[in-house]
Amino acid sequence: MKEIKSSTKSFLFKNGKIIDGTGNPWFKADLLIDNGKITRIAPRIRKTGVEEVLNVSGLIVTPGFIDIHTHSDQTIFISQGENVLSQGVTTHVVGNCGFSMAPINTENADDDIYDMLRSLLSFGDKYQIYKSLNEYLKDLKEKGIPINIAPLIGHSMIRIIVLGLNNREPNSNELERMKEILRESMEQGAFGMSTGLDYPPGSFAKTDEIIELCKVVSEYNGIYTTHFRGFASGLIRATKEAVKIARSGISVEISHFKAIGFWPGDIRKACKVIEKARAEGLDITFDVFPHASNYTFLLALVPPWIYISNDRIDIPNAIDTLIKSKTEGKLRDKILLEMSTIAASFLDIKEDKDWTKVFINAPKSREYNGKQVYQISIEKHKDPREVIIDILINQNGAVNATYLSITDEDNIVTIIHPLSMIASDGFIIPEESNAFPNPYCNGTFTQVLGYYVREKKLLTLHDAIRKMTSFPAQKLGLKDRGLLKEGFWADITIFDADRIIDKATYENPRLYSEGVEYVFVNGVLAYDKGIITGSKSGMALRR
């Protein structure tokens, strides 16, 4: 993608269809921005003194899209943001699923932690350690970033500092220390705390521990976001746990709310649980992505006892166990049998050809990267489960995968639900990267607008825009973004409603979206008809 340079100046958009983010239908108006802010919206604005005028007749003018759930914590430093700007996204919320770039204690963060961070946060071989949120935000500001970043604090990071990777409850002194660390991060501008209750060490935490920490977040009017426990068979139970935590008075956001696996009716039941909680006065909402898949560790397909040893994460032990299984028949049979059970419940896999539902992301491996497990099994003349074991050994456990694990019917339920907002669960991808991610990294917002709005007519355009702009801004407490309103920051996306569409597929997830014409980040032109300007006009936001 080509790159040009841009800077702050006044722009006048003439004759656009304004969708302001409130949920109201479009209206025709001109819009003026100057010095990074929206200064006027009116039926006609004179061109006098304006540095550049854009005739956007026939195009939709909206607030820049806010992605409330991403993992761009590290890649924001090493990319121009091509895959997100081409979707019209101007703000990423990072620090999700319990993992964040700060705070990290080098004494307690061993190689296993860094391996996990490499997978979740797209760490490369070289990365910066941040002992505080202040350090992280300062680095973002000094190095310059293509879009805005709003940080959450990962619960797992706090737990690691105090408890290491141990599977136990904190004593009263340890819990107070965890609260102190969280309070420091909230003071430094965190928007809230996230958990990853499906992932160790977050999975070791009991509900009461989370509630006690959420009380600290509530002191600062922050939010609690959760990748909760058991998206598959435990969906209803996990939703009820989120409701219990909300009763502490915290504003809860359920991350990428999906029924992972094939459990007919569960997602509707879970929605009813949330609706009932809202009726009781609890502040619970959720975010969703439109793709019928999810993206996480390949280790998710092996039995948990392999990578949890002595009540802690133990990747080296997992690799040793998998290596032993190659020569020890009973161990091999036990692992393969349990893998079949996991795959059946998680992916509805009943026979070898069903392993087309798993795509490997192993950027350092030409042998595996971008291929389906079934494809590799045919090439290697091996059982697909043994292929997974081989890949984990070869990549030392640090490999992810895209799983076709969600039904289209369930997707529609959550996307059109009035309590949902749109989020990618993706990350900014450097253009030169070999990453083979889930296509939602490149096409979440454009798929909703092109497919669910224009083609399927399941949402109105103005309601879809609300789910991408003012709704997440309201949840985060962003007072001056998410709406087209005089005095607000000029994060603006302009697109052709007849052309906008995602192009990324499971076979080719790196294709950029089409139909977005212009994107402005804090009043600076960042995306100009397919050209990245290299503006670095994003801000490190603080609550």
Image: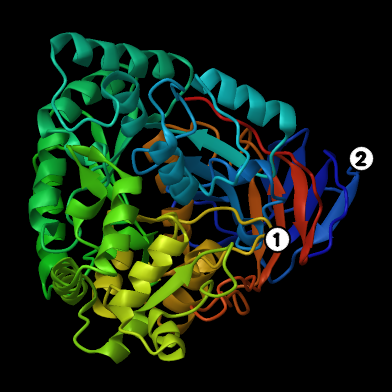
Q: How far from the left and from the top, in percent, is residue 522?
A: 69, 39
Q: Hey, which quadrant is residue 356 in on the image?
A: bottom left
Instruction: Examine the rendered structure and indicate whether residue 57 appears above or below residue 177.
Output: below
**Percent coordinates x, y for residue 158 in the rendering:** 33, 24
Please identify the quadrant where the N terminus is shown. bottom right
User: Amino acid under label 1?
Assistant: Glu
> Residue lying farthest top?
173
Query: Which of labels 2 and 1 is toward the front?
Result: 1
Q: How is the image coloured?
A: rainbow
Between marks 2 and 1, how big is the CA–CA gap? 38 Å
Q: Label 1 belongs to which residue?
A: 431
- Marks 2 and 1: CB-CB under 8 Å? no
Q: Is residue 198 visible?
A: no
Q: Secondary structure at mark 1?
A: loop
Q: Earlier in the sequence, mark 2 or mark 1?
A: 2
Drawn side of residue 429 relative to residue 255, left or right: right
449 to 85, vertically: above or below: below
Residue 175 in picture, x, y percent from top left = 20, 16
On residue 49, which mark appears?
2
> 116 or 403: which is nearer to us?
116
Left or right, residue 4 beside residue 355: right
